[in-house]
Amino acid sequence: MMRSRKNTHRLWGVKVRSFNEIDLIFAPIDIGQPSSGVRLAPDVFTENQLIETLEKRGWISHSKWVTQRAVGDSAKHSLEEFSRISEIIASITAHSRERDRFCLTIGGDHAVALGSIGGLLKSNSKLGVVWVDAHGDVNTPSTSLTGNFHGMPLAGLLGIDDDNYWLNNFDWLDKHLDPKRLVFIGVRDLDPEEKRFIEERKIKIVGMDEINNKGMNQIMDEVVDHLKTQGCNEFHLSYDVDAIDPSFFPATGTPVANGISANDAIHLVESLRLTGSLVSMDLVEFNPSLAKTPVDLNRSITLSLDLVLTAVGHPGKKAGIHSKLLDCLNFFKLTKKFLSQNQ
Ligand SMILES: [Mn+2]
């Protein structure tokens, strides 16, 4: 059997990834919460030249759109629709990683992460997940106070299934996330049951006090060390923009005060990309219709684009340096051979 070519190489002895291709999964999904404006975010990304900017940087991009069948109130608690959409997204992300492409999912609300991460886990059981969010998203239908799906994806991914809810309705969800391979950053609004789940499973959680005391640099060093110690070989970043302070990112449905600063929000992403092991990202809960002023809208658009462009960086940049070094080395070898043959 032919092994697929992996875009992995060693630079100065360090294993790094260098992608040239990116899958863009646009998921205008609002099924997980009450405000339909969150469906507009993918259009805002494309209208603001996301694809053109990536291609100018040298990325080969492949766009896929996943749309929900039902809209309006009927869709909000439709398990069937939630499962159908998640399964489609999961099949795309699993396929994307098998082809060794960077995989970027643009929501939509955070319900899309059940599919994106569910699919990624099918292609790599050693995936580490960094969940950046003001909330825990680890409710089950029996613990949720709202019944909103966007507060539940992690429960499904972790296999928290007291009522066989996931088992009965999401049969495609066959690979679970090991709680040791999950880290929360920026969480500051947990329901009591969520708090209990997280404590019981000893999931690493980095709150705002810790970020403010230690600084984002040290936090990210610790997060990456933790995930590597747990055997993670690649990282996925699930970025809910409500982790960011509402003064920097106002256009979102469930804002919570005292969040991450704009600089730290970017710095977090940059730190993960520089590990060379970041392979995928979700950007969710950007709701353009909730911006109260044009300034608020612009601020949210600019930061959204910065976050995803920082995560993906430039294609094959490290590979470029590496291959130039190899070219030099080969040139010297050939010259030496030529000289020795012509002596
Ligand atoms: Mn969330």
Image (cartoon, grey):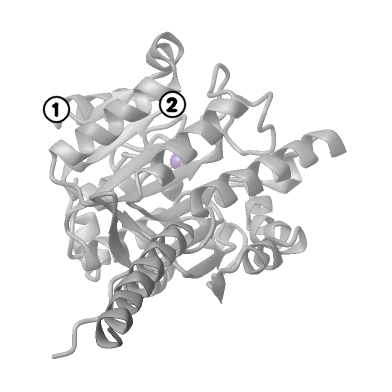
Q: Which residue is mark 1?
A: 200
In what quadrant of the picture does the C terminus appear?
A: bottom left
Q: Is the distance from the Cβ of mark 1 to the nearest ligand 1 atom less than 8 Å?
A: no
Above or below, 332 against 106 in this view is below
Residue shown at 43% from the left, 32% from the top: 135
Which quadrant holds residue 144?
Answer: top left
Residue 284 visible in rendering:
yes
Residue for point 37% across, 39% down: 131
Residue 226 placed where, x, y %?
21, 32
Seen from this angle, which residue lies furthest front? Answer: 343
Which residue does the image show at 23% across and 68% down from the upper left?
A: 123
Q: Position of residue 42 (x, y in %)?
A: 64, 60
Q: CA distance from mark 1 to mark 2?
A: 19 Å
Q: Amino acid at mark 2?
A: Gly
Residue 71's x, y, as percent?
Answer: 60, 65
Reading the image, the residue beneath label 2 is 186
**Please, is residue 38 above or below residue 7 in the view?**
above
Quadrant for residue 246, please give it.
top right
Q: Nearer the viewer, residue 332 or 84?
A: 332
Q: Which mark is residue 140?
A: none
Amino acid type at image mark 1: Glu
Image quarter hosting the N terminus: bottom left
Residue projecting furthest to the top = 213
Return the disc, 1 or 2, that comes first in the chain's sequence: 2
Quick one: 130 or 100, which is closer to the camera? 100
Are discs 1 and 2 less than 8 Å apart at CB? no
Is residue 93 toward the left or the right of residue 309 in the image?
left
Split into quadrants, the picture shows ligand 1 in the one at: top left
Residue at the bottom extreme of this rendering: 1
